[in-house]
Each structure stands twice: as structure tokens, then as C-alpha cells.
Amino acid sequence: MRLDCEITEIDDEGGRLTREEDEELNSISDSVDDLGFSQQVVVGYALTTKKKESFLQPKLEIIAKKKGIVFVPIDQNRPLSDQGPFDVVLHKLLGSEWCQILEDYRLNHPDVAVLDPPYAIQCVHNRQSMLEEVAALNLSDSFGRVCVPKQLVIKKDSSIISGEVAKAGLKLPLVAKPLFVDGSAKSHKLYLAYDNVSLSKLEPPLVLQEFVNHGGVMFKVYVVGDAIKVIRRFSLPDVCKRELSMYAGVFQFPRVSCAAANADDADLDPGVAELPPKPLLERLVGELRRRMGLQLFNIDMIREHGSRDMFYVIDINYFPGYGKVPDYEHIFTDFLLGFMDRKSRKHPFT
């Protein structure tokens, strides 16, 4: 398993090429002409407009083409089996009808790699089940320990939240997240609750997690098959006891993954900024890939402030924003070529 622990801070605009990037594309075009890829990998894709714009950027398409990889849009108005033939189907659409179409196609075309199987993705559409996979690992070794924050699921009736929180022994403040991840803006809304009385203002179904002080830094662990890329981002600041006594209410906070984070101007404590150990990440990612059956996902991970080796996984996302990851074009195309190699050795994707 390959691990790239480069620390990078990126804004979320993407898609527009600078002059330097344009010159780099020309250089890439010249340099890969002689690589000699004789086979072609046809990737059918079914993506939302937003995902297509962020993922299928010009640099990716140029590099892919030079490596013999072609991206072909899937027409959702036509039977999937009538399209192609495809070597890979890449998708990020929701809806039970689409999932059933894709599952039927996968079973009837075992030689096609469906990234990822609909049944496997369901796990990360539920914030309870996604973290249960991490908790079940009970991962602890000489490099550190990986846990999940203590959490509680409330499926209905906001009036019982305060009582259930007390019964479960959860400590304030609490992070509140929608239970289901359905791609909507609402499913990504996050709140921080400072007092028990205000908990009734939250709208179930939701997950409540104890807030873990982590020095205001989060690690985004991007996974593409065997490849791992770690990016450090700014997160919510720590909450002290004095703040708990001063504030009351429930406050919405922005998605950390969409925040512009510039670490170059920050004087970070080395103990906060240090990346999780490579062997620990490799073991965590390998176990999650095996348990969930996913190739494309990212893990949101934090280190407990004051500890060097106590880590928490707070979220897992399917097919995340790879366009924000440096060199994702090479990482992803190499990954796809690996699938072509597996297919040539007649290993079906079931």
C-alpha cells in the first residue's frame, strides 16, 4: 500500500488553469507520448454536474488519454447494458432506482469494475454504520490507537434528546450531524451544542458526538485503491471549560472540507500538526477497505489534543473531492490502469 504524507492546503475553486498549469499540461502531453500504452481503458461515468466539474478537470483528461484511458458519459435515459462496452463504471448518483440498475449491471457484467458497488456504498450513507466499522476494528498498536467519539443516535422526537444524552453519559459540547448522508446540502449541516436545554432545537434523525479537542487541525485521508494521500486542514478550535460556562445554544458551523485553509501563515504546535504514523494509516485503510468493500473514499481523522497517539475517526465519505488533492490525476489514472491489468489476468470484479 502506497502512502503519500504530503501536507497540503488547498482552496476549493479548482477547474481553472493557471499559465503554469497550462505549460505543465503541454509538458505532460509531450512526455507521455512515448510511454507506449497499447490498450485502452473505457471508463463510463455517471456523475452529478458538480462532481463532473470538480473531478473531470482538463489535466486529468489529458493525462488519462495519453495513458490510454477514455472517459465516456453514461446516458441515464438509455438502458445501461446497451451502452459501452466499459471496462470501468465510475459513479456517484443517488436513488434506489439507479442503485438497482447498477447492481443488476454489475451482476450481469462481472468483467466490469463498478466503482464502487452500490451495496458497499450504503454503509457510508449512514453515520452510525460508517463509524461502527471503525469501532469494530479496535485498532491499537505501537503506533497509536484509533477510536470513534462517544456518540448517540436519535431517530425521532427531539424532546427526548436531553434525557437520552444524560442517560448515555455524553459530555458537552456535542457535535450534531444528520444521520443520513444523501448528497443534499442539509445532510452536510453540522452543529455544535453547548447546553442540554438547547438540544431540543435539533432535528432528528441525527447523530450526536462528543466534541474532542484536537488543536483545530483535521487530517483528510484520501484513499484510491492502494494509494493514500493525507492532507492537513484547519478545523474547529478547541473548547475550554470557561467557554462552556459562557455560551449556550446550538450553533451551525461550516463544512471543514470546504473551508479555505492556509497553514503557511499559521504557527502550529508541531504536536498538533504532525501527521498520523504511516503504518497506522496503512493498517486502518487496509482494514476498512476489506470490511466495507470500497476503493474510493476518504476518512476525516483528528488527534486528541495533548496526546501524540490517540486518534479519532469522525466521518467517512464515498468518492470525495479528489480534485482538491495534489497529483490526483496521476494517482487516479495509475489506479485505473491497475484495474486494466487485473482484467487482463481474468479476475472478475464480483
Image: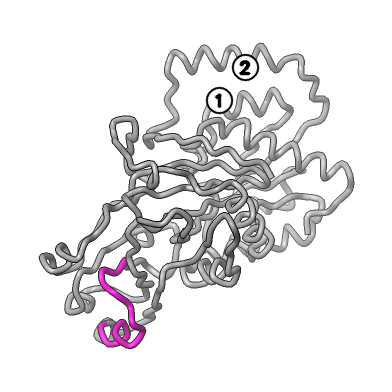
Amino acid type at circle 1 is Lys
Q: Is residue 308 left or right of residue 85?
A: left
Please tell me in which quadrant of the rendered image residue 209 appears. bottom left
Residue at (42%, 25%) from the top-left corner? 16
Are the residues at dot 1 and dot 2 in contact (C-beta closer than 8 Å)?
yes
Examine the rendered structure and indicate whether residue 45 appears above or below residue 126.
above
Question: Which residue was labeled with disc 1?
Answer: 59
Q: Can the viewer see residue 53?
A: no
Q: Is residue 24 left or right of residue 292?
A: left
Amino acid type at circle 2 is Ile
Residue at (45%, 48%) from the top-left corner? 219
Which residue occupies the foreground of this view, 286 or 303?
303
Other residues around mark 2 within 10 Å, as few (<14) / some (14–19) / many (≥20): some
Q: Which quarter of the rendering shows the C terminus?
A: bottom right
Examine the rendered structure and indicate whether residue 150 appears above or below residue 252.
below
Q: Position of residue 145 (x, y in %)?
A: 53, 62
Residue at (28%, 31%) from the top-left corner? 265
Which residue occupies the foreground of this view, 90 or 279?
279
Q: Which mark is residue 28?
A: 2
Q: Which residues are magenta?
A: 162-175
SS for dot 1: helix
Q: Is residue 91 magenta?
A: no
Which residue occupies the foreground of this view, 11 or 4?
4
Q: Is residue 331 left or right of residue 301?
A: right
Please tell me in which quadrant of the rendered image residue 155 appears. bottom left
Examine the rendered structure and indicate whether residue 337 appears above or below residue 306.
above
CA gap, disc 1 to disc 2? 9 Å
